[in-house]
Amino acid sequence: MKKIGVVLGGCGVYDGSEIHEAVITLLAIARNGGAGSVLCAR
């Protein structure tokens, strides 16, 4: 199982990470046998 980091950056409506895209990214990682880890950067 590969460990894959997903970095979420920004905050607010128009300059932050889009929640739907972040969830779909983590879902795709899990479906392909990886382990997603999230880092929130400000």
Image: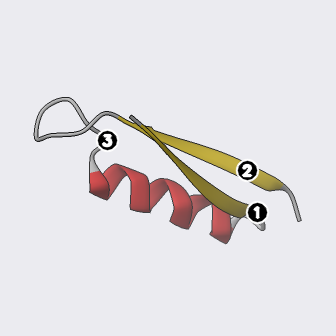
The kind of residue on which mark 2 rests is Ile
- Is residue 14 depicted above or below 13 in this figure? above
Identify the residue at image location x=58%, y=46%.
Answer: 6
Q: Is residue 20 left or right of residue 24?
A: left
Q: Is residue 3 left or right of residue 39?
A: right
Q: Is residue 14 left or right of residue 9?
A: left
The kind of residue on which mark 1 rests is Gly
- Is residue 12 depicted above or below 22 in this figure? above
- Is residue 39 depicted above or below 27 in this figure? above
**Would you name the residue on which mark 3 appears?**
17
Q: What label does residue 42 carry, if any?
A: none
**Would you name the residue on which mark 2 appears?**
4
Quarter the C terminus occupies: top left
Asked if marks 2 and 1 touch (Cβ < 8 Å), the reply is: yes
Q: CA distance from mark 2 to mark 1?
A: 7 Å
Asked if marks 3 and 2 touch (Cβ < 8 Å), the reply is: no
Q: CA distance from mark 3 to mark 1?
A: 21 Å
The disc, 3 or 1, on the residue closer to the chain's N-terminal end is: 3
Q: Which residue sits furthest left?
A: 13
**Would you name the residue on which mark 1 appears?**
34
The disc, 3 or 2, on the residue closer to the chain's N-terminal end is: 2
Query: Tag 1, which secondary structure?
Result: loop
The kind of residue on which mark 3 rests is Ser
